[in-house]
Image (cartoon, helix red, strand yellow):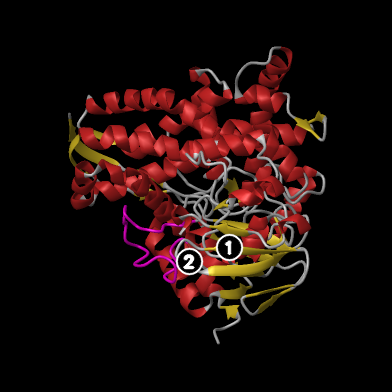
Amino acid sequence: MAKITFIEHDGTPHCIEVADGTSLMQGAVSHNVPGIEADCGGAMTCGTCLVSIPPEWLEKAGRRSDEEAQMLQFLGCAADNVRLSCQLIASPDLDGLCVHVPESQG
Amino acid sequence: MSDLTIPPELFAPVWNPASYKHREAVEDIFTTLRRDYPLAKVEVPGYDPHWVVTKYKDVREVSRLDEIFHSGDVSKTPVSKMAEQMLKDYSGGQPHIFRTLVHMDKPDHTEYRNVLKDIFMPQSIATLESSVRETVRGYIDRMAQKTECDFADEFAMLYPLEVICNLIGLPKEHHAIMLRLTQWFLSYADPDLCRPGSKLDDPEHQVRTWQIVYDEIKAYYDPVIADRQAHPRQDVASLIANGKINGKPMDERGMISYFVIASTAGHDTTAATMGNTMWILARNPELLARMKADPKLIPGFVEESIRISTPPMAFIRSATQDYELSGRQIRKGDRLYVSYLSANKDEEVFDDPFAFKPDRTPNRHIGFSYGSHICLGQHLARLEMRVLWEELIPRLESLEMAGEGKWQESEFVCGPKSVPIRYTMK
């Protein structure tokens, strides 16, 4: 179980618990976190579950797969700390992580 | 507290293909349902009872929870109990003749989707832009040689057909075969588009037509499959023909069905949206003037056209367990008629929902559905529509209807079959 805080682009925080092994996107959608649209349900084809994570958490969050990197490049999200939340899997390592939802998903 | 049971006489036209020639009347039924029966059951004589899911929030929830609300356990479209029994007889126990992505659940759905996933990723589709643009310019140049045309029949039904057939790897002279089979399949009840000889008043004709479509698609694709297995090329046909499911070759029904969905859903829906959008433009000179003045609105125009048109109007799901949805107790085994057409007009989500607003923000429509079954071809459809309007709108100097448009008579995938227009072009 990891406690994850999603911060909307207007600053509203949403603190939720995400079960180990499930994606942050799944957690956000089941808790109705605004801005995590996740149209494709985690198939990595829509790019509507973007979050940015603080640089100090990058290593714990794990590396992007080639597919995720290609999708992010296509979306014009070059920054290292932007991720698809469907590809971030909850574990005790991510407990306390705080992510930002971009304005484009407001 | 709104009512739990929808009067069958209010709902029955929704399942009657002939109702759709008066599209507004069907939209009115859903407006009433959203207001008075937002999530309620209906028992239409001859059919199993169904929950009718009309609200945007509920449609998203059901679509997202794909392990609770299965896609493959009952017919995807409303068929009578008698027709469903026939489907089972034909298919050896399945409630469908076809076994496409639409009819599958996890884990098969993921495995089958992965066969074409990469080629339909947005970054792959983006590489097609110049060739799609070249294709649409050909149609626009031919349109410019005249001053009147039937935009549905002469343009919308042909251009996305050409794009998808090229992508599949079919020669141009075979594109018309795919159009004919698509219309037999998806417009089985329209008197102008249905299979000749099929009896519209025979309750068995729908099932029989689908079986014939399956057989004809199989007859067409069997040699294509053999060719691509022997000599793979860079095309969708080669990906399907050599596709592996759990490391093994696809079974016959899965493979033929994959070709069915690629060759039909891959163009018919886009054609429906384009035809309807032209119909809207031709009746709305202010909208055309606005779009000519501000081409940056085109991506929003495309999204709004999809929301307004919503060509695949509904799918049926069934519950694998008890679930409480918006205060209603859904029971294991219950069927749900999930209406994207209604959800995309939900007044609580879309302000003035029947108005066409290219600058609608946000526009989180679910015209491509939502969740793991979201349209595989959504990025291709968007590309085809964006380049169409980018190329056509600047060249249109005047535009009006040249007669009455006509909707298809179809309760499943629906768009206009005729959009006669008169125009002047640069």
Depth check: B359 or B36 in front? B359
Under mark 1, the amino acid is Phe
Under mark 2, the amino acid is Gly
What residue span does the magenta drawing correspond to?
Answer: B344-365
**Secondary structure type for disc 2:** loop
Depth check: B327 or B226 in front? B327
Q: For the N terminus of chain B, give its image quadrant.
A: bottom right
Quadrant position of residue B231: top right
Q: Position of residue B157 (x, y in %)?
A: 42, 35
Q: Position of residue B153 (x, y in %)?
A: 37, 36
Q: Position of residue B163 (x, y in %)?
A: 47, 28
Q: Is residue B78 visible?
A: no
Quadrant position of residue B270: top left
Whether residue A8 sits left or right of residue B207 in the image: it is: left
* Above or below B154: residue B202: below
Please tell me which of labels 2 and 1 falls first in the chain. Answer: 1
The residue indicated by pointer 2 is A11
**Residue at point 54%, 63% (across, down):** A7
The residue indicated by pointer 1 is A6
Q: CA distance from mark 2 to mark 1?
A: 9 Å
